[in-house]
Image (cartoon, rainbow, N blue to C red):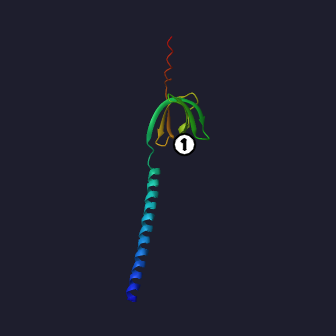
Amino acid sequence: MRTTRLMILSLLGVLFVAYFALVGAAISGVAILQSLADTNHRVTAKVTVQTFNGTIEGIDPAGLRIIIQTEMGMQSLPVANQEVIHGVAQGDHVTVKLDEQGYVLAIVKNNFAPKPAPEPRS
C-alpha cells in the first residue's frame, strides 16, 4: 500500500512538472510568435489610409511635424521622416498622404492654388 502511494505521488509529481513545462513552452511560443509578428509588421510597407489637400502653414524639422490648413481646419501632423518635408515650404499648396497611424508619408506639391471661398451674398 505504501508503494502504491509513492507511485501515485511520483506520478502526480511528474504530471505536475510536465504540465508546467507545457504551459511554459506555450507561453514562450506565443512570445516568439508575437515578436515575429512585430518584426514582420515593421518590415512591411506602410499603407496610405488618407489623402487630402491643404496649405503648409508651418514646418518643424526638429520635431518632425507640419502644420497644414485643410478644409477640416488647421492640423499639426507628425511626419514619418526628414525626407518627407524636404523641398516643401510654408505657403505651398500640397497633397498629404497619411499612414494608418496618422504619420505623413508623402507631401506632393500642387501646381494649382485652392479655390477661393465664395463671396457672401448680399
Q: From what the image shows, is residue 19 above or below residue 7?
A: above
Crowd band around label 1 with a 10 angstrom C-alpha radius: few (<14), some (14–19), many (20+): some
**Label 1 sits on residue:** 81
Q: Residue furthest top?
A: 122
Q: Percent position (x, y) of residue 37?
A: 44, 55
Q: In this view, does 88 lie above or below 21?
A: above
Furthest residue to the front?
Answer: 1
- Determine whether 58 is above or below 37 in the image: above
Question: Which residue is rendered at x = 48% and y = 30% of the image?
Answer: 53
Looking at the image, which residue is at 44% across and 39% down? Answer: 49
Left or right, 41 with respect to 56, comes to left
The number of numbered badges drawn on the structure is 1
Judging from the image, what secondary structure is the residue with disc 1 in?
loop
Measuring from the top left, give residue 38's x and y in whole percent. Answer: 46, 54
Q: Quadrant of residue 10?
A: bottom left
| Quarter of the image where the N terminus is located | bottom left
Which x, y percent locates residue 25? Answer: 43, 67
Q: What x and y, as percent, mark residue 41?
A: 45, 51
In the image, taking residue 115 as reference, residue 3 lies left or right, namely left
Residue at 39%, 84% in the rendered image: 7
Type of the residue with mark 1 = Asn
Say which of 69 and 112 sits in front: 69
Q: Which residue is drawn at 48% across and 38% down?
A: 98
